[in-house]
Image (cartoon, grey):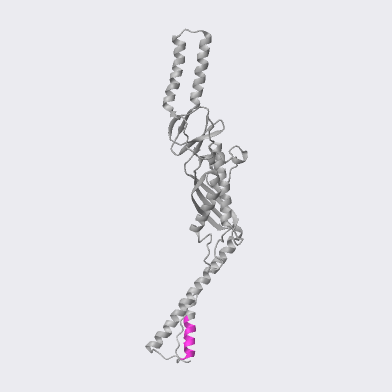
Amino acid sequence: METTELKHEAPYKGMVLSGFLMLLVLLAIIAGVFYSFAALTLSDDAYGMIVFVATLAIVLISLGFMTLQPNQARVLIFFGKYKGTFSRDGFYWVNPFMVKKKISLRIRNMDVAPIKVNDKVGNPVMIGMVLVWKVKDTYRAAFDVDAGDENSKITINTTGQPAANGGNELSKALTNFVMIQSDAALREVTSQFAYDDEETDSQGITLRSGSSEIVEILESKLNDRLAMAGIEVVEARLNYLAYAPEIAAVMLRRQQASAIISAREKIVEGAVSMVKMALNEIEKEGVVALDDERKAAMVSNLLVVLCADEPAQPIVNTSGLYH
């Protein structure tokens, strides 16, 4: 009967026995061998046959044991064919001819070190992120990512301890794949936005002001890139954002100049409103009658006092109003 070969993740439906039960069988075989040597009188050929059969049985039974912790899975392969994924935690025994690839389904962190990228307007910026990911499709993770290539063992420079330095070859390959694709996605998203608004009235999304929108776009790009390997992005967050060192000083001065201009505009706006209020109150209360020339002088003096960087020095006028 011809069976259909699986091309996607599916639960393993083959024979699975308790590991403790098969452990008792294994101990019983070992005890039987010792009993045959101690209590039975057999020919040398018979003893040899018993040893051969017992050794073969012990080896085959031993190869079938597997232990799974919570959030771990085994991809079972029978002579090159995918037979399913087994993910129940515990101690089990399966067909000893099965290849049992262990895959972790646990959440993993990755600290992507700051990289230099040109933003939308061409300014070099340093940007880094923290990525939280896990394996979602064990079939894709096991068969769509090459774990045998020596290039998959390259260590990417990160501020944290790279997971590619330990674990089995599949774990190394997955970690390296996530590192490279995360770097590419971060570069792609960064190049689509400016670091900051060039114009004060701009309402566009920038890397500095649109953190939530940037994160959503980044997570979407990462999921698109990592889905081919059966990996799901749980969360992605920017943890470092700054201008590159070669332009940081210039951009700092530009930001300071923009801040000063904005502050001056606010001061002038407030001063004008205060002068207007003062003139209206004087005229309304009839404190003194001022012609246009005196009003202009009063406006000039008030603006100097209100807009000056330092406190104005008072001058007492001992003469008349027009002297």
Taking depth in this image into account, of 94 and 6 the one nearest to the observer is 6
In this rendering, does residue 311 appear at all? no
In this rendering, does residue 46 appear at all? yes
Taking depth in this image into account, of 153 and 203 the one nearest to the observer is 203
The structure residue drawn at horizontal position 48% and vertical position 80%, both measured from the top left corner, is 303
In the image, residue 278 above or below residue 239: below
Image location of residue 60, percent across then percent down: 51, 23
Image location of residue 196, percent across then percent down: 54, 63
Taking depth in this image into account, of 173 and 21 the one nearest to the observer is 21
The structure residue drawn at horizontal position 51% and vertical position 57%, both measured from the top left corner, is 214
The structure residue drawn at horizontal position 50% and vertical position 71%, both measured from the top left corner, is 263
In the image, residue 304 above or below residue 91: below
Image location of residue 11, percent across then percent down: 47, 37
Residue closest to the far front:
1
The structure residue drawn at horizontal position 47% and vertical position 84%, both measured from the top left corner, is 299
What is the magenta range?
Answer: 291-302
Q: How many marks?
A: 0
Task: Give the main secondary structure of the magenta stretch.
Answer: helix
Whether residue 277 sits left or right of residue 157 in the image: it is left
**Residue 152 is covered by the magenta coloring:** no
In which quadrant of the rendered view does residue 275 lie? bottom left
In which quadrant of the rendered view does residue 119 lie? bottom right
Residue closest to the far left:
285
Image location of residue 206, percent across then percent down: 53, 61
In the image, residue 152 above or below residue 261: above
**Residue 293 is covered by the magenta coloring:** yes
